[in-house]
Image (spheres, grey):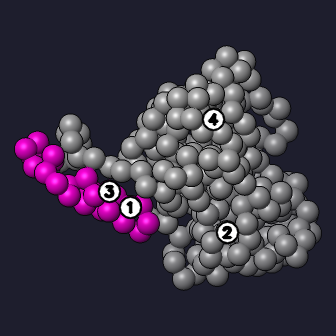
Amino acid sequence: MTATADMVVPSFDDDVETDRTLAIICSKGSLDMAYPGLILGNAALGEGVDVHLFFTFWGFDMITKGRMEHLKFSPVGNPAAHMPAALAPLPGMTSMATHMMNKSLDELDIPPVPEFLELLKASGAKLWACRLSADMNHVDESDLFDGLDGIINASDFIELTEGAQLLFI
Amino acid sequence: MATTTINGKEVVVDDEGFMTEYDQWDKEIGSALATAIGVDMTDDHWKVIDFLREDFKVKGETPTIRRVSTAGGVDTKTLFQLFPKKPAKKMSYIAGLPKPHGCV
């Protein structure tokens, strides 16, 4: 059961020792801005890249138990929502837009935020909460996603992602 | 597209070496492909490969890691252990299927 000499074997870079690391700072708490970091992080993990995510400012909602399941997509001030600007602020528009976005994501089998965090965790991601954001929101570990690796400050994050490629979202 | 000989059989592969003809694959070829990329096949590996083959037949596309865990019943952590570093690509290569198109 051997492969012949002329067989083309794809390179999966197993023998290449890369220390490629991707650091993603998630600073937004709206539904539409939560997903880019999660999706890119997941893609990087699938390519064998080490991934660290740092949740800070509004991005803290992504890991806050009481909020992570209820992120909203608002069409207000968002030209990419393709809605007349005067209609966007009307009552019910945000919940309707949120509902539609969640439906689209679900149809593509893209998991809700809490489940997505579980997926990243299972794939080997490191998830960090911002110390300052925790203090401002008066929360501790018990209020946050259970799979977090810790609450750290900005300096700690910069230190542990030395040499990493960085995304600020 | 080119043809190559795997385990004594002539098969069509793409530029990277992924098989392109679903029906040319058999388990012996799968074993040879696994050996070529350094994966030692166990029953757990075969469970994943069998799911990939079945799901492709029904859906017409290679399942993503997420689909293997939700519909195939093998969780993500296990997939990373069975097919280290790049599970999606490695398992589709061994199963004789194209790389998955989905992002998640």
Judge the density around disc 2: few (<14), some (14-19), many (≥20) Cα neighbours within 10 Å. Answer: some
Q: Which residue is mark 2?
A: B69
Q: CA distance from mark 4 to mark 2?
A: 27 Å
Magenta highlight on residue A96: yes
Q: CA distance from mark 1 to mark 4?
A: 25 Å
Asked if residue B42 shows in the view, the reply is yes
Q: Which residue is mark 1?
A: A102
Q: Nearer the viewer, mark 2 or mark 3?
A: 3
Query: Which residue type carries mark 1?
Result: Asn
- Measuring from the top left, give residue A117's x and y in whole percent: 61, 51
How many discs appear?
Answer: 4
Q: Which residue is mark 3?
A: A98
Asked if residue B29 shows in the view, the reply is no
Q: CA distance from mark 2 to mark 1?
A: 21 Å
Judge the density around disc 3: few (<14), some (14-19), many (≥20) Cα neighbours within 10 Å. Answer: many
- Taking the spot 67% from the left edge, 16% from the top edge, the residue there is A155
Q: CA distance from mark 3 to mark 1?
A: 6 Å
Letter of the chain that mark 2 sits on in the rendering: B
Query: Which residue type carries mark 3?
Result: Thr
Q: Which residue is mark 4?
A: A129
Q: Which mark is residue B32?
A: none
Judge the density around disc 1: few (<14), some (14-19), many (≥20) Cα neighbours within 10 Å. Answer: many
- Taking the spot 23% from the left edge, 46% from the top edge, the residue there is A75
Magenta segment's dominant SS is: helix
The image quadrant where one finds the N terminus of chain B is: bottom right
- Taking the spot 52% from the left edge, 61% from the top edge, the residue there is A111
Letter of the chain that mark 4 sits on in the rendering: A
Q: In this view of the protein, which residue sits in the foreground, B14 or A93? A: A93
The answer to whether marks 2 and 3 sit on the same chain is: no
